Image (cartoon, rainbow, N blue to C red):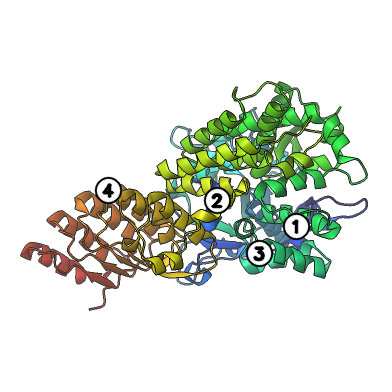
Amino acid sequence: METLKDKHKEALERKFEVVSEGIAKPGEQTLLNDVFTHVWITEGSCVEVNHGHEVMQVETVSKSKKSEIHSIKCSDIFKPLPGQTRPIRTVLMKGVAGIGKTFSVQKFILDWATGKDNQDFDFIFLLPFRELNLIKSEMSLEELVQCFCPDIKSSQVLDCHKVLFIFDGLDESRHPLKFKENEIWSDVKKPTSVDVLLTNLIKRNFPVNSSIWITSRPAAAGLIPPELISRVTEVQGFEDQQKEEYIRKKCKNRALADRIISHIKTLRSLYILCYVPVFCWIVVTVLEHTLEESRGANPTTLTDFYTYFLLVLLTAKENKENVLKSNQEAILKLGKLAFDSLEKNIIVFYEKDLREYAIDLHNSSLYSGVWKEIFKQDSALFQEKVYCFLHLTVQEYFAALYVFGSHQNNNINPLKITLFSLNEGALERAIQSRTGHLDLFVRFLLGMEMKNNQELLKGFLSHTKDHSSDIQETAEHIKKLIREMSSPERCMNLFHCLSELKDKSLMEFNVTLDKVKHSSQRLSPSQCSALAYFSLLSEKVIDVFDMSNYATSEECVRRLLPVAKITKTLRIGGCELTLRCCEDLASVLQSQHSSLRELDLSHNNLGDSGVKLLSAALRDPNCKLTTLRMRECELTKRCCEDLASVLQSQHSSLRELDLSHNHLKDSEVKRLSAARNDPNCKLII
């Protein structure tokens, strides 16, 4: 059995020691250990509801203080913390697309295979969901293992050995995962459906000494019942120091690496996005070429970078315009696949999907050589291939290429509208999305209309046009939407859209805390959104934010609440908070990334429902609030019951609670006093 184990380790080492990152020159290989940069991983479940594009969450993460969030090394995810006695059997690792989940899995396996770490596991089996989707026939657990690890011939591997099953990409699963309906299955030799095998493995019904590691984008993490999970971790991506470390590993020219770091630091919103390792790689790949060539203006917007990235991946020896022209039809087909799949939230493709869009990977030069970096063949199980775009944002870029290219080249317009109307319709559809899944698509679409990007896309575009009047009209329409929009997340993206259009009037919105303090002005709702936008992009840390200085309505409060996550002390006294405000504030309190420690809600009649919402948030393990002031809030008996439950909660961090001037009755005071004497109460008297 030791010989089999050694062969298994050797096979995994060969598979994962080399990575396909970037465009390798003939004879060159990129070793995982040479480029791997540790990402920041945190422990703990995060229940906050995010209504923005998942990649844009990093704008808040970037303000989080690492010292205040429990971090964990990837190599330690199955190791109990000091004082923990329960073994860690099932780990759910969450993280947005491209944040480093799969790379972390590969590094974990490589370190195990080379004897560096986690040697208590006898065997590790990696079963990606995108490949599990290909299995339609029934099979046993033993046969499933042998499908993915042909070197495992012995049926004794699952007997008396400690085994780790890694299921990568839960969000890509096309299996229903019917945990409640599926029958109990425990025979490792008896065939059944893959879905039954998976649910019973995760429920630990097989007589196998196994541990389970599941990776997933946040939206799909709820597919696994929480009671089956021992530990939840979340990959937060690169911190600033790790960004620079990664850039220096990727760019061997030290002087050029310094210039790349200096350039992206001047582009604050893009520098923040470099928390996502894949985006960081795209930025480095582009700037290595543009800064070294020193020709023309360097990219400054998101669309600029992705357009340059598209061109960098074309062979330098060929005329890029000719290459784009000769592959125009192929790009449009790939773009249509990207666009339709974006609407359906599909990011993994199979050969039947390609046939449906008449994409022939064998006959076009587009799909050979470096273009494989954009639309990658990920694996081949049972002789069927699996494909995906390099990253979700690349799929969104190609979707925008299809829409804009179809319009510009006078082909059939997928949205059946003219240029300004096309922008108007795309913006409307993006605004209507609760998940923000079209946010980056619409940014790319608008950015492509700029003259510099049209010039770069010559060849794919049959001609360039002066869209200045449409761009101006679109910018005015966006400002109108900002004035009318109530969703804070949608407002943030609308400001990003103005940035893609390089709209000079964006600076008219540049409201900062210092400017407002000096002028003592009250802000309109759109100015409140601008203040939130520029505060999130600023490097400046906000210690105290007194919302009552700026908010004049419920809408103002809601638009300013994104700032609440990045401030330590928040004052919302006398702002006439509504139930919707309380819902939004509760979400801030439950956020793993919130810096909020002191909250003053005085002089607000929050009502029973409002206090109930806030109390539930205060009992959440992620809530780190230590001080709460609720003077003159007209608290009722029901409110006092909810607040008492907070004091008695083992998860509450409250040290100071001010309920003065609420005219509490004796029974209410008695209830709060009893809670204060509870062993879990942490109030300092």
Residue 214 vs residue 515: left or right?
right
Residue type pointed to by label 3: Lys
Q: Is residue 310 visible?
A: yes
Q: Earlier in the sequence, mark 4 or mark 2?
A: 2
- In the image shown, does 649 or 634 lie closer to the viewer? 634
Q: Residue at the location (50% across, 46% down)?
A: 52
Please give the residue where the numbered disc 3 appears in the rendered image: 265
Q: Earlier in the sequence, mark 4 or mark 1?
A: 1
Rendered position, 496 above or below 521 = above
At mark 4, the secondary structure is helix
Q: Residues within 10 Å of mark 4 (few under 14, many from 20)?
A: some
Please give the residue where the numbered disc 2 appears in the rendered image: 505
Badge 4 vs badge 1, beta-carbon distance below 8 Å: no
Please give the residue where the numbered disc 1 appears in the rendered image: 284
Residue type pointed to by label 2: Ser
Q: Earlier in the sequence, mark 2 or mark 1?
A: 1
**Spot occupied by residue 661 in the image (x, y as percentages of width and height):** 14, 67
Marks 4/2: CA–CA distance: 35 Å
Marks 1/3: CA–CA distance: 13 Å
Q: Quadrant of residue 252?
A: bottom right
Please give the residue where the numbered disc 4 appears in the rendered image: 579
Residue 491 vs residue 106: left or right?
left
Badge 1 vs badge 3, beta-carbon distance below 8 Å: no
